[in-house]
Image (cartoon, rainbow, N blue to C red):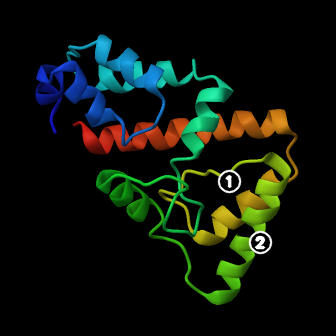
Amino acid sequence: MDLDQFNQLKAEQAMDALKPCVHIPSWIQSIVMQRPFVSADELYQTAALHTQTWQWSEISESLAQHPRIGEKKAAMTLSEKEQQFSQKEQAQLDTEHDFQQALYQGNLAYEHKFGHIFLIRAAGRSGSEMLAELNRRLENTTEQEQLEVKQQLSEIALIRLKQEIQ
C-alpha cells in the first residue's frame, strides 16, 4: 500500500496493517496516532524512533509470534502476511541435513540459556551467517542478549514496514 492509502485508513485498519510488522501494540498505536505522514521517510524515522521505547516485556510477548530460524511455524498462528514475510526472510537457509541439525541444536541451547527463541534478522543473511551469529550470541549475558534481540526485532519490523507501506 502507498503512504496516502495508509494515512487515510481508519485507525483500526491502520493498526491491522502494521500488525504483521511486529506484535507490539504500543508501537503500532504510536505510529497510527501520528498520522498523517508527509513522506515515507518520516513514517520510517518515526517508526524507528518508537522502537527505542520498547520494553523487554513487550519484546518477549512479540517473540511468541516468530518462528524459530529454520522452522516454518511460530508458537502462535501467523497471519498470511506474516507467513509471507517469514518465508521471504528465511529463503537463504540451507536445507542440508547437517546444517539443519546444527541450527536445531543451537536453537535448543539458546532457548535453554535465555528462555526464548533465537531471533535474528534473516533478510540478507545466509544460513551459515545466522548459525555463526547464533553461536556467538550464546556467549552473551542475558542483558547483552536482550539488547541484541531488541535491535534485531527493530530491524525486522522496519524492513517489514518498508515492504508494507511505500
Identify residue type, mark 2. Answer: Gln
Residue located at (54% from left, 73% from top): 93
Viewer-proximal residue among 5 and 126:
5
Identify residue type, mark 1. Answer: Phe
Looking at the picture, how far across and down is residue 59, in whole percent?
60, 33
Q: Describe residue 99's horizontal placement relative to residue 154 as left or right.
A: right
What separation in Å lies between label 2 and label 1 (alpha carbons)? Answer: 12 Å
Q: Spot the residue most to the front.
A: 76
Q: Spot the residue most to the bottom.
A: 97
Up the image or down, 27 lies above or below 102; here it is above
Q: Describe residue 36's horizontal placement relative to residue 126 as left or right.
A: left
Residue located at (24% from left, 36% from top): 165
Q: Quadrant of residue 54?
A: top right
Give the number of callouts.
Answer: 2
Viewer-proximal residue among 39 and 147:
147
Q: Check disc 2 and report the residue beneath it.
A: 105
Residue located at (71% from left, 33% from top): 147
Query: Does dot 2 land on a helix, a strand or a loop?
Result: helix
Up the image or down, 3 lies above or below 87; here it is above
Up the image or down, 5 lies above or below 83; here it is above
Residue located at (55% from left, 69% from top): 71
Looking at the picture, how far across and down is residue 142, in whole percent?
84, 38
Choose the circle earlier in sequence order: 2 or 1. Answer: 2
Label 2 CA crowd tier, 10 Å (few <14, some 14–19, many 20+): few
Looking at the picture, how far across and down is residue 157, in whole percent?
45, 38
Position of the N terminus by quadrant:
top left
Q: Check disc 1 and report the residue beneath it.
A: 118
Q: Describe residue 136's horizontal placement relative to residue 42 as left or right.
A: right
Position of the C terminus by quadrant:
top left
Query: Does dot 1 land on a helix, a strand or a loop?
Result: loop
